[in-house]
């Protein structure tokens, strides 16, 4: 506040220099030093007038696609994180304002680093065909040097998998619950439903891991040298680990709940095991209606909603388990 009158006057003089005669209507630009001040113009307009393209843009055949991105730059790399905000599989041509560098795909789900064969560098930007799963994401990394390092783990394929044939797994399933948690250890079901829709309270309010078992056949004519075989679990709540013929094929934790089973499958009979885990919600809802001495769990959380604090006994049950439909998809 010292000498504030003189300092206020200095600020006013600086403001006049910066803003000049700008009124935001007839005069919207003012030169100052080596730069310009704009009023009533958005940043995109300013950049486009100066032929500065978007940092990232894309072209797509879909009008409903919604993409988001973040761009970070290091001393030797341009790193883009791209996210598909829609619930459908999307193909785009991603346009990056990067030139003279070799792009790679870094898969955030698997950790694989993939080389890209299909891209166009026009000297100002690089265009890459990209494929996104529903709500899927990718890292696109541009580096100074050509690819070929040993840590690259494959080639990126931007073409969507289109099934040429599909076998739905109809019929019954054997399911196993862990002992001592209120549910039957073994059960046979004729259709896939949410555990919360069961008439058995031990299943209805179950939280934990349930094992689904099924034997199915793959016709020999569907398996060829070029065929790709995928297992599609359909709807899952919440996480699933898949085993085929005693081989673990990994954990599926987001849509689409699909996994490549080409190497693990065989002509004829195949043994499928799917372990599915839900959250603790349903267990806590069910036990809120029981005396304390009959409960399996304890919690100091009064309800699932942190804002309104709805008590557990008044909270809804959540869909849980393998809801399907489960199918085998074959394509190239």
Image (cartoon, rainbow, N blue to C red):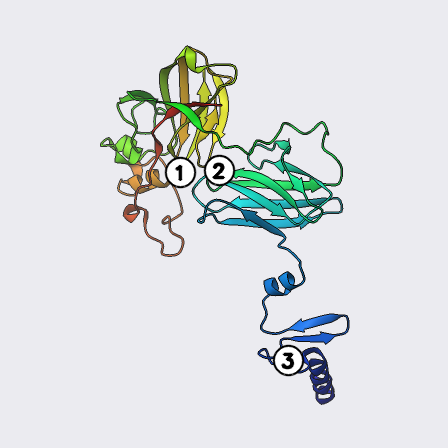
Q: How far is the residue under mark 2 from the one under mark 3?
A: 48 Å
Identify the image quadrant of residue 172. Answer: top left
Q: Position of residue 183 (x, y in %)?
A: 30, 28
Q: Quadrant of the N terminus?
A: bottom right
- Mark 2 is surrounded, within 10 Å at the Cα level, by few (under 14), some (14 to 19) or many (20 or more) other residues, namely some
Q: Would you place residue 98 above or below residue 29 in this image?
A: above
Residue that appears at 43% across and 43% down: 87
Residue placed most toward the observer, 139 or 280: 139
Q: Position of residue 58 (x, y in %)?
A: 56, 48
Q: Would you place residue 98 above or below residue 250 in this image?
A: below
Q: How far is the residue under mark 2 from the one under mark 1?
A: 24 Å
Q: Would you place residue 211 above or below residue 96 in this image?
A: above
Q: Position of residue 268 (x, y in %)?
A: 40, 10
Q: Which residue is at the far front?
A: 122
Question: Seen in the image, is 210 located left or right of residue 21?
Answer: left
Callout 3 secondary element:
loop
Identify the residue position indicated by label 2 in the image: 133
Identify the residue position indicated by label 3 in the image: 22
Identify the residue position indicated by label 1 in the image: 279
- Mark 3 is surrounded, within 10 Å at the Cα level, by few (under 14), some (14 to 19) or many (20 or more) other residues, namely some
Residue 271's label in the rendered image is: none
Callout 2 secondary element:
loop
Nearest to the eye among marks 2 and 1: give it.
2
The mark nearer the N terminus, 2 or 1, is 2
- Mark 1 is surrounded, within 10 Å at the Cα level, by few (under 14), some (14 to 19) or many (20 or more) other residues, namely some
Q: Position of residue 159 (x, y in %)?
A: 53, 32
The mark nearer the N terminus, 2 or 3, is 3
Residue placed most toward the observer, 279 or 223: 223
The mark nearer the N terminus, 1 or 3, is 3
Callout 1 secondary element:
loop
């Amino acid at each position: 506040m010292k000498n504030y009158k003189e300092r206020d006057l200095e600020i006013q003089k600086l403001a006049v220099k910066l803003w000049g005669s700008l009124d935001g209507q007839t005069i919207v630009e003012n030169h100052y030093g080596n730069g310009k001040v704009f009023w009533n113009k958005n940043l995109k307009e300013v950049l486009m007038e100066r032929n500065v393209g978007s940092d990232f843009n894309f072209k797509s055949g879909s009008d409903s696609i919604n993409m988001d991105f973040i761009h970070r730059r290091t001393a030797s790399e341009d790193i883009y994180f791209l996210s598909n905000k829609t619930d459908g599989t999307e193909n785009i041509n991603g346009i990056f304002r990067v030139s003279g560098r070799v792009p790679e795909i870094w898969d955030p789900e698997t950790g694989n680093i993939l080389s890209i064969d299909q891209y166009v560098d026009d000297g100002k930007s690089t265009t890459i065909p990209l494929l996104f799963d529903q709500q899927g994401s990718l890292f696109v990394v541009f580096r100074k040097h050509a690819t070929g390092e040993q840590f690259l783990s494959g080639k990126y394929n931007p073409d969507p998998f289109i099934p040429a044939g599909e076998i739905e797994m109809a019929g019954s399933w054997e399911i196993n619950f862990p002992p001592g948690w209120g549910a039957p250890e073994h059960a046979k079901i004729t259709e896939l439903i949410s555990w919360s829709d069961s008439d058995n309270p031990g299943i209805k309010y179950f939280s934990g891991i349930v094992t689904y078992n099924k034997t199915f056949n793959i016709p020999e004519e569907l398996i060829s040298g070029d065929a790709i075989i995928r297992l599609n679990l359909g709807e899952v709540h919440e996480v699933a680990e898949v085993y085929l013929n005693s081989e673990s094929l990994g954990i599926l934790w987001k849509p689409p709940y699909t996994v490549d089973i080409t190497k693990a499958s065989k002509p004829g009979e195949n043994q499928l095991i799917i372990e599915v885990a839900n959250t603790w919600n349903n267990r806590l809802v069910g036990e809120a209606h029981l005396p304390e001495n009959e409960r399996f769990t304890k919690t100091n959380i009064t309800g699932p909603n942190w804002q309104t604090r709805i008590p557990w006994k008044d909270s809804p049950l959540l869909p849980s388990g393998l809801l399907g439909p489960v199918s085998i998809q074959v394509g190239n």
